[in-house]
Image: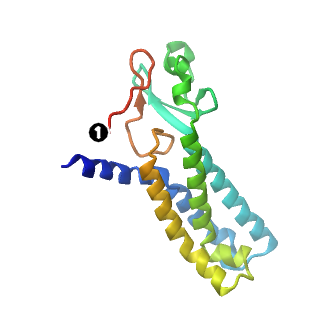
Amino acid sequence: MPRTLKLGQVAAANLANLLPTGTVLAAEALLPSFTNKGECSLANEYLTLGIIVCCSLACFLSSFTDSFIGKDGRIYYGIATWNDFWVLNDVDSEDDAGGEEEDKKEKLAITSRDFVHAFTSLTVFLLFAMSDSDVQKCLFPKAGANEKEIMMNFPLAAGFLASLLFMLFPTRRKGIGYADPAPVKLDQGGEVPARSNNE
């Protein structure tokens, strides 16, 4: 298989990790009930806004999660912070299981690319959530035909542009919920090895 085609397939396969598909599915499952199928009372409006805010936060924050394989062969998950990496499942730090990142925390810390991915993913989620007909009836009952048409068709264009952006600027994060079973494995010196163009 030509190298360019292989790289294109890898980039396209990673879109499922970057686009907020799980968050959209969760919202789509809950919104019909929370919006009362578009017949909203004040309580339904608050419930609808609440689920959209909660899913938005989950979508945004998931861009800052990462994972790595420790010296003991276990997968460790964590959250990147400004100058650090907070390991979530290192319950026994005495066994050097999650201590591998101590020397090179800046390799796993937040980068500007993480913010690009987080805001793009958040925008795509919000567009898809607002394009739901029940949400439109509940939150925007007086929207005209033009506004409804824009709200129905804009998510397709936004999803395409976000996919293009994610393919041009791929992430190195293998966070919580990502399908790729091969997170970053730190080498003997605790370094994150540079990935080749074949990955």
Q: How is the protein colored in the picture?
A: rainbow
Rendering coords of residue 186 (x, y %)? 42, 23
Residue 145 position (above or below residue 44): below
On-image quarter of the C terminus: top left
Rendering coords of residue 45 (x, y %)? 76, 69
Rendering coords of residue 182 (x, y %)? 37, 36
**Which quarter of the picture shows residue 89?**
top right
**How many numbered tags mark residues here?**
1
Query: In the displayed image of the protein, which residue is found farthest to the left?
Result: 1
Decide if residue 97 is on the left or right side of residue 118: left
Is there any visible trace of residue 86 in the rendered image?
yes
**Which quarter of the picture shows residue 151?**
bottom right
Q: Residue at x 50, y 40 (%)?
A: 175
Rendering coords of residue 197 (x, y %)? 32, 38
Residue 183 position (above or below residue 23): above
Query: In the displayed image of the protein, which residue is found farthest to the right?
Result: 42
Q: Residue at x 53, y 65 (%)?
A: 158
**Which quarter of the picture shows residue 49?**
bottom right
Using a 10 Å C-alpha cutoff, classify the residue at mark 1 as few (fewer than 14 neighbours), some (14 to 19) or many (20 or more): few
- Looking at the picture, tell me which residue is in the foreground, 38 or 12: 12
Residue that numbered label 1 is attached to: 198
* SS category of the residue bearing label 1: loop
Is there any visible trace of residue 90 in the rendered image?
no
Q: Residue at x 60, y 77 (%)?
A: 150
**Amino acid identity at mark 1:** Asn
Query: In the displayed image of the protein, which residue is found farthest to the top?
Result: 94
Decide if residue 166 is on the left or right side of residue 115: left
